[in-house]
Amino acid sequence: MAHKNIVILGSTGSIGVNTLKVIERFSDKFKVVGITANNNVRLLEKQIRDFSPQYAAVGTKNISVLKRNINTKKIKILDAASDLEWLVGLKSVDIVVIGMSGSAALCPFLSALRAGKRVATANKEALVIAGHLIRHTAKKHKAEIIPVDSEQSAIFQCLEGQCRQDLKKVYLTASGGALLNVPKSRFNQLSVQQILKHPRWKMGKKITVDSATLMNKGFEVIEAKWLFDLEMKDIQVLVHPEAIIHSMVEFRDGSIIAQLGMTDMRLPIQYAMTYPERWKAPLKSLNFAKLKQLNFANPDFKKFPALALAIHVGQKGGTLPSVLNAANEEVVESFINGKVSFSKIYTLVERIVLRHKIIDKPNLKDILAADQWAREEVQPYL
């Protein structure tokens, strides 16, 4: 088997780091062509030394720093703000792994699809704000989208080989985040660092806060709608604190198929890269006798209103998901920087969502304009 050439967008984040671990294990089968980061120059430099990619992209303000420390005769340094679309479209690239978060991934995502690549994506924001464009582009250019998030990967695996007409419902599991067992009255007493302690997964700051509000799970509902061509009403969120069942699908005869596994991102990343094959992974098998029991509950929408808001926005569609995502990105960043309280995340995002005049069936320009509008609209409150 010839090498598969990989580009990783967001190589210094948790998805990128775990992708490189998979590639390291199968170095005879995968080759890193390009890696990108925004601010983490030190880790990016180490990755360049370890994997010798042809290209590395970094945020504009960090280009000069990277060039000083790297032999530019062996590697071409790119600007992450402007060159990612070109990088993912290179003829030599087979698989694009999207580990970067936020709406900034949208344009390179679309570019990779237009180039007919396999896109292994952990970025939910692009699908949330422009799911219809992404689906259309993938279909038009015969590109593959294989999800890397554990929940979406689980659904992907459960649906494999099944007749879609027989599908009744999808159960999207949620660990419940850091605040599952914390009374709502105590939310604003918790420090940013306490909120950032996720009980099951080690992730970036923004997605960890989104997990605490359950906004992340709302985004995943919208994402699943587009990934699997579902109706919002056919996706049910189920709180499952152990995070052993990563998601389930139910068929009209009453049968339910679940995907279970260790809470390790290398598993869904590896599957997205090797699909349809399954290769040996360095993970322990589940010990069912030790598990004893698995718990499930319906989400508390009063305690976590962001989940209900995201589901409402997904039902409305148009440019509203773009507004939801952009406002949330801005407010969460302010929370992480200690500028707004935790409870303000929901109230400020809801305020901006309610002000927006929805454009139905938006094009890319409409989506990006709605994104910019929401960011500007929320600034006076931050």
Image (cartoon, rainbow, N blue to C red):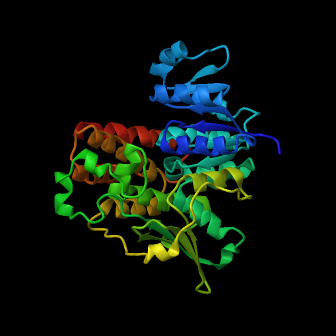
In the drawing, does residue 5 fall left or right of residue 125? right
Quarter in which the N terminus is drawn: top right
Residue at (65, 20) in percent of width and height: 75
Image quadrant assignment for residue 114: top right
Front-most of residues 129 and 125: 125
Residue at coordinates 27% horizontally, 66% vertically from top-left? 181
From the top left corner, tell me how far across and down residue 54 is, in percent.
68, 25
Toward the viewer: 240 or 168? Answer: 240
The furthest residue to the right: 1
- In the depicted structure, whether residue 319 falls above or below residue 290: above
Q: Is residue 154 above or below residue 256?
A: above
Q: Nearer the viewer, residue 154 or 344?
A: 154
**Residue located 28% across and 51% down the image:** 195
Where residue 110 sits: x, y (%)? Answer: 62, 42
* Up-down relation of residue 237 to residue 375 (above or below): below
Q: Position of residue 363 (x, y in %)?
A: 56, 45
Image coordinates for residue 249, horizontal then vertical, percent: 57, 74
* Residue at x-position 42% and y-position 63%: 311
Q: Quadrant of the C terminus?
A: top left
